[in-house]
Image (spheres, rainbow, N blue to C red):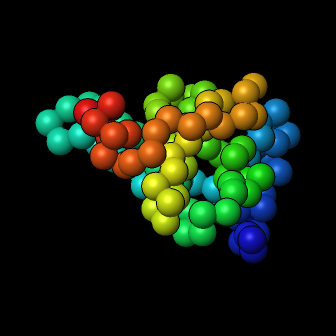
Amino acid sequence: MKYTEAERQFIREAEGYGWITHRNGWPDFLLRKRGTKKYVCVEVKNKSTEKLRIKQWEMLSCLKEATGMPIFVYWPKNGKIEEVRGPNQRKIRVRGKHLGTLLSLYG
């Protein structure tokens, strides 16, 4: 990814203060259940064999750790859904087989 000079300066300064910067890998969707404060993040993968890239895993696990929000990877072609568990648990565990099941668990 190309950064502007201002962005490169920001990254240098932030890292100089001990921060790790994350820019790539944000989830595809942030869902909020209508009328509630319930949120779920979902990363959608096109191919049934497609996996999270390293930057995606880093971003999603940091987001999970920071917010405690449920974060999932969804493969519509085969209906598979897996939960991103967090930075100290690299394994992703299967939660269910259908998006409706997943969303009903959190809504």
| Image quadrant where one finds the N terminus | bottom right
Q: Going 33% across and 40% down the picture, which residue do you hit?
A: 101
From the viewer's perspective, is residue 3 above or below residue 32?
below
Question: Could you tell me residue 6's position as x and y percent?
Answer: 71, 64
Q: Position of residue 51 (x, y in %)?
A: 69, 57
Q: Residue furthest left?
A: 35
Q: Nearer the viewer, residue 92 or 80?
A: 80
The percent position of residue 60, horizontal first and vertical second, equals 61, 43
Front residue of this view, candidates 76 and 12: 76
Residue 11 shown left or right of residue 56 in the figure:
right
Horizontally, residue 51 falls left or right of residue 38, namely right
Q: How many marks?
A: 0
Side (left or right) of 49 relative to 43: right
Residue 87 visible in image? no
Residue 36 can be seen in this image: yes
At a point 45% along the width and 45% down the height, the residue shown is: 97
Report the residue at 82% width, 51% height from top. Answer: 12
Quarter occupied by the C terminus: top left
Foreground of the two, 61 or 5: 61
Residue 28, image x, y percentages:
49, 59
Quarter location, residue 82: top right
Instruction: Pick whichever, 24 or 102, lies toward us.
Output: 102
**Residue that appears at 49% across and 66% down:** 77
Q: Is residue 52 above or below residue 97?
A: below
